[in-house]
Amino acid sequence: MPHLDQRRAELLRRRLAGDDFTTLARELEYTDAAHAAAVFAQALADTEPLEQNARHEADRLALEELQNAIWDKATNGDLEAIATALAIHDSRARRLGLAVPARLTAAGLATDPAAVTPAELDELLALIEDPPN
């Protein structure tokens, strides 16, 4: 069995390459997949600084593995598995920046805040307190 630091490095390398925790646990002699996942999480936390891309890739792989674990149930109509798959999908979209709401653009010309008159300010405040229907 490799030295502890070599084993953790191999766990990091292979997990980032896409190996699942069950395979890693068996081949690198961890107690089980949960133990391998815990060592992986600690190795990520201990690595200073790990490139942000590597963290994103590790996160993406974890979400993919979770989704793969419930995919058959979801596609066979299990409502709880469908809800879980959708939650994983939403989490992935947020993390990848795909869930960013559309940007609103102001209609009309931009106004210099210093040029707003007290009357215009009162009008704007009135609209905020009692918006038109």
Image (cartoon, rainbow, N blue to C red):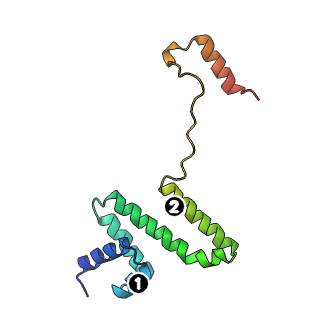
Looking at the rendered image, the quarter that the N terminus falls into is: bottom left
Q: Distance between the residues labelled 2 and 1?
A: 24 Å
The correct choice, above or below, for 66 with respect to 23 in the image is: above
| Labels in figure, total | 2
| Residue at image point 69% right, 72% down | 79
The correct choice, above or below, for 94 with respect to 11 in the image is: above
The correct choice, above or below, for 83 with respect to 117 in the image is: below
Residue 133 visible in the current orientation: yes
Q: Which element type, helix, strand or loop, lies under badge 1?
A: helix
Quick one: 23 or 33, which is closer to the camera? 23
Seen as rendered, the residue at the extreme right is 133
The location of residue 88, given as percent across then percent down, is 56, 65
Residue occupied by mark 2: 92
| Residue at image point 55% right, 14% down | 116
Q: Which element type, helix, strand or loop, lies under badge 2?
A: helix
Q: Of callouts 2 and 1, which one flags the residue occurring earlier in the amino acid sequence? A: 1
Q: Are marks 2 and 1 in contact (CB under 8 Å)?
A: no
Side of 106 where 114 appears, left or right: left
Residue 69 in which image quadrant: bottom right
Looking at the rendered image, the quarter that the C terminus falls into is: top right
The location of residue 105, given as percent across then percent down, is 56, 33
Q: What residue type is labelled 1?
A: Thr
Classed neighbour count for the residue bearing mark 1: other residues with Cα under 10 Å, few (<14), some (14–19), many (≥20): some
Residue 29 visible in the current orientation: no
Residue occupied by mark 1: 23
Side of 122 where 92 appears, left or right: left
Classed neighbour count for the residue bearing mark 2: other residues with Cα under 10 Å, few (<14), some (14–19), many (≥20): some
Quick one: 2 or 105, which is closer to the camera? 105
Q: Which amino acid does label 2 sit on?
A: Arg
| Residue at image point 68% right, 23% down | 127
